[in-house]
Image: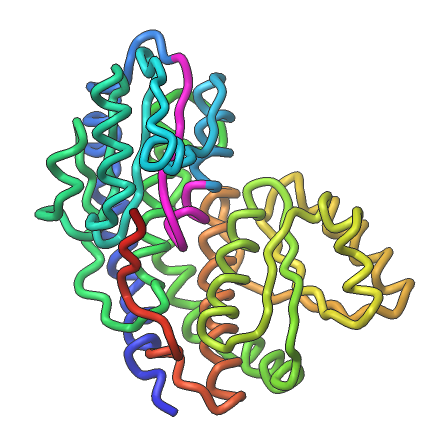
Amino acid sequence: MTGGLMAAEMADQPQVLARLVDRAPADAAAVRAVVPRPLAGTVFLARGSSDNAAVFGRYLAELCAGRPAGLAAPSLYTRYHARVDWHGYLMVALSQSGATPEIISTCEAARGAGATVIGITNEPRSALAGAVDLLLSTEAGAERAVPATKTVTAQFAVLVTVAAALGTGPATAGALAGLPGAVGATLGDPRPTRELADRWCAIDRLVVAGRGLGYAAALETALKVAETTGILAEGMSAADLYHGPIAAVYAGAPVLLVSGGGPGDADLAALRHLLDGRNAETASLPARTVAAEPAQVIMAVVRGQQLAHALALARGSDPDAPAHLTKVTETT
């Protein structure tokens, strides 16, 4: 068991986020300079952990811009060779490595069909840079552990800035105020995650539920747990859990409820009341409270990283290098 790389990269997050908070005004101005006017809508393009950040961006963009937002399907371009009119649309492509072939080729296809494309990556000299109109670097530094941590929260933070540049809503110029310090305090208090890891070290499945902006944190937490431990973890909307998947919970799958600090938390409270009444196994993880909901979601992502790390160690696994996984997955 090691886990030292993942732990060190998690510990870098306050400094990485502080740099992005300082840079936010300049980034917002750069985004405003390229956004199509009028804006028809915003589409997010990503895979893996970046795709969970894209879900967060999709919610924020629609709330702030007042225009439809969605998620791209790369196979439409790489396998079906779709011909789509992208004029008036903004595409936001997220790739930590900036090297995923299908992300780059989809950017090129959309841009060639009239889209304005913004790229968000940790590698500013990657191939993605040549396929976009504006590149925003996460400046997270080298990340060697297979599970992405600091590059993910950096993407979330940059997306808050992008959404703030599109209009008004929960993503504002001050939405990230206090976040670096709060993340540092949360990282300095691993006790809640270690206690839950000890309690759940023998589980073989897990449901992670969130709602609204917090849904993205639930997805990312489930992915981190799955890739570090091999536990069959699934992130889903609390609303979707009420349908067929709740049968798995009643059959014994524990549920982690992820708070986003916004209107969706009322639904989580109602869900917990229902599950507790059926003697289902539920838990939640506290995090330092910050003023704005987007920042609170990033706090929840950090708690999810801590849980994944602690669960892996409790199960005798190395979270730095999970079996059968590599740092970059070059899907085409």
Q: Is residue 88 above or below residue 191?
A: above
Q: Which quadrant of the figure has residue 212?
A: top right
Magenta highlight on residue 239: no
Is residue 104 shown left or right of residue 162? left
Magenta highlight on residue 51: yes
- Please report the bounds of the magenta region as a residue range: 40-54
The picture places residue 37, in percent across and down from the top left corner, at 30, 9
Q: In this view, does 2 lie above or below 125?
A: below
Q: Which residue is drawn at 59% across and 69% down?
A: 232
Is residue 62 shown left or right of residue 266? left
The picture places residue 34, in percent across and down from the top left corner, at 21, 20
Residue furthest to the top: 38
Q: Residue at x 39, y 92 (%)?
A: 1
Is residue 301 or residue 231 the one in the foreground? 231
Q: Which residue is drawn at 40% across and 20% down?
A: 167
Is residue 277 or residue 182 the one in the foreground? 277
Is residue 330 or residue 284 the one in the foreground? 330
The picture places residue 176, in percent across and down from the top left corner, at 38, 44
